[in-house]
Image (spheres, coloured by chain):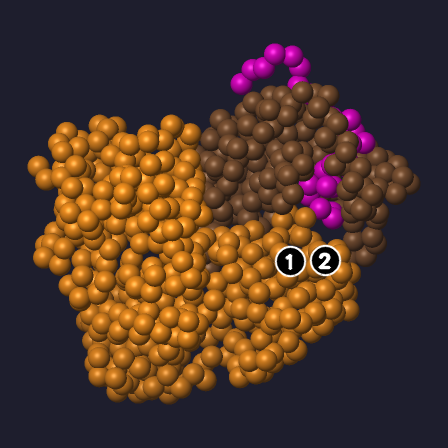
Amino acid sequence: MRWVYSLSPELEEGWDVLGGKAHGLVVLRRLGLPVPPGFVIGTEAGRAFLRHGRLPDGLDDELAAAVAELEATTHRTLGGPERPLAVSVRSGGSVSMPGMMTTILNLGLTAEATAGLAAEAGDPRFARDSRQRLLASFAASTGGEPIPNDAIGQLRLAVAAVFSSWDTPRAATYRELNGIPHDLGTAVTVQAMVFGNRDDHSGAGVAFSRNPNTGRRVPFGEVLFGRQGDDVVSGGSLTRPLHDLADREPAVWAGLLEALRRVEEHHRDACYLEFTFEAGQLWLLQARPGRFAGAAAVRVAVDLADEGVIGRHEALLRISPRHLQLVRVPRIVAVDEADVLARGLGAVPGVAVGRVATTADRAVRMATDGPVILVRPVTSPQDLPGLAAAAGVVTARGGPASHAAVVARAMGKPAVVGAAGLAVDAAGASVRAGGRAIPEGTAIAIDGTGGEVVMGAPRVAMTAADPHLQRLLDWADEVAGGGTGRGDTERLGAAHAVLRPGASIP
Amino acid sequence: MTRPGPAHATGADLLALHTLRCIGFASLDRVAAASGLPEAEVESELIDLAVAGLVTRVAGEFGGWGLTEAGRAADAEWIAGELERAGTRAVVAEAYDGFLALNPELLDLCAAWQIRSVDGVASANDHADPAYDARVLDRLTDLDWRVEVACGGLFAAMLRFRRYRARLGDALARARSGALEYVTESTASYHAVWFQLHEDLLATLGIPR
């Protein structure tokens, strides 16, 4: 039995064996795009591990052979004292389970290899930082088991840690809730590390080929200079807009635009990339379709039809009637960029306008005189009365599963979370954003779809006036025959019934 | 879970003050429910604490009791003193580690309870699909068992923490018997009690949030 596969353009194994992540990397290689060399331990080995509680027979030999091949390709030695090879070890099943599974970076940085990397880069700080990340990710995933100082021992431990992370209770809960079978298991992708933390011309980021909030055909994303990729998605660091790359690293920017173009052409849809650049060289680490929702999904489908990439019928079929429900949400329109205080993550759709309150107590008191927006670094149960009294909430930290998001959702209040550009000074009863101090009582507005926090009371419109939606619905009427007085969902549903007879209409 | 010696009992004055510290500004009946003390006793304690300048009462529709800055400082000092006298720092720290391991999963479950992804579109869970709700509640029940494993030592050692065990169990039982607001929405919901427990563990160990 064969457990390990080299990541090459010719690799023919499917999604079920390689997992979604590795399959995406094979596609990138076929498109001629830069992907760090590596290999995949397939899901068969993952399932064998789950059955027997240990790595399957024969895997050790195959791992050794795969590492030797990778060493030959990179002219480096895993854990070696000179020109050391470090690798990333990532999970990736046939179904995506974001954030549930273990990842180990910088593996192979034994004490000797770290010294070798420091000498090679002429930068001991960079080498120490990288080793520290390895120790931290091992500690988080193996629960204090001693870390072997030999590189192959580290690799075996890391592979076992990734395989067993399939069975954590949290992952089991995720599968239960999302109807994913428990016996699929995961694959493990091992790739040569590329170091976003290497020097001033290094960094990492994420990129969409189109704006995921609006669907507009402009590359969108964020980038962190001098850092590794996990810092971008962890939400703990202040990222820069993707376009900053154009000035600071023009070659990386050009490479990224070309990659977005090719991947979008391959999927015939908006796409998402994770990338790292090391010493000015671009590397792609993950690719997938964009999976937009609401108005953004509608705009992308209509634009792709206009661009001749897909037909109008396919555009209609790509939009679920459920997307239309999301399209009809109030949005802030036509804001002067100077009035935008911060951007965060839209956590609960809708627009709220009110006066800034920086503590729950003051929100409660101020709410007797009119609507209030509660602005907090994060929220806790202490803030519940303030959340109850406020028209909307903004937090500087936290993601869609944060306390503020969960509570605001329960109360049906617009919420923006992770607005990292905001600093809340509760003692001084003010908020700082973009170099400005905004005292408590100042009128602001928030858009829980796009994540904008803006000054004053901007113009708000139901997005139903969206010209892209009107065009899509016109196409639907051409397919199914027009009819006045029908709702958006009925018009699209009628077109689906003609284009896909037998499919159920929700 | 057993442990040598009787469980540590917190005095009514500190219990009233610390309950307010953990649940935030609240009405009298909520302070009573969270502390497990009768309303009349809590009110008497709160009035004494107000005289000492540690809590204040706000009248009106959104009124209730809240901590003053002095009350917050006094609570931090007294609760740290209690921890040292009772010799329970290690057992609280162990429970906190166990709690943190479960916390992301509880947040996943709350998000899944409120938002459901269909056709790649996240929309509010309208609770029209009993099978889906039952899946969430089954996983919440499973998690509730693991809270007992992770924090059982603490529940055995300190009475005021045992109150969370009862309140979490009560919220889960109500949700399972059809009172769906007891998962995330009510002020006595599983989510609300969970976050008060989180706040209490942080406050007791003196860890800033």
Q: Which of A341 and A104 is in front in this view?
A: A104
State whether residue A76 is above or below residue B206: below
- Kindly tell me whether residue B125 is visible in this rendering: no
Q: Mark 2 falls on what kind of element?
A: loop
Q: In which quarter of the image is residue A459?
A: bottom right
- Residue A40 appears left or right of A431: left
Q: Which residue is drawn at 63% across and 68% down?
A: A433
Amino acid type of the residue that numbered disc 2 sits on in the rendered structure:
Ala
Q: Mark 1 falls on what kind of element?
A: strand
Query: Whole-percent x and y of residue A210?
Result: 35, 74
Instruction: Find the magenta span and give its range.
Output: B1-26
Q: Residue at x 31, y 82 (%)?
A: A303
Q: Residues within 10 Å of mark 1 (few under 14, many from 20)?
A: many
Query: Which of the numbered marks, if any, corresponds to residue A315?
Result: none
Tell me the brown chain: B
Residue position for label 2: A426
Query: Whole-percent x and y of residue A81?
Result: 29, 39
Query: Whole-percent x and y of residue A478?
Result: 26, 87
- Residue A409 appears left or right of B122: right
Q: Quick check: marks 1 and 2 in contact, CB under 8 Å?
A: yes
- Kindly tell me whether residue A147 is visible in this rendering: yes
Amino acid type of the residue that numbered disc 1 sits on in the rendered structure:
Arg
Q: Residue at x 60, y 21 (%)?
A: B156
Q: How far is disc 1 from disc 2 in space, using C-alphas?
A: 8 Å
Quadrant assignment for the N terminus of chain A: top left
Query: Which of the numbered marks, if any, corresponds to residue A376?
Result: 1
Tell me the orange chain: A
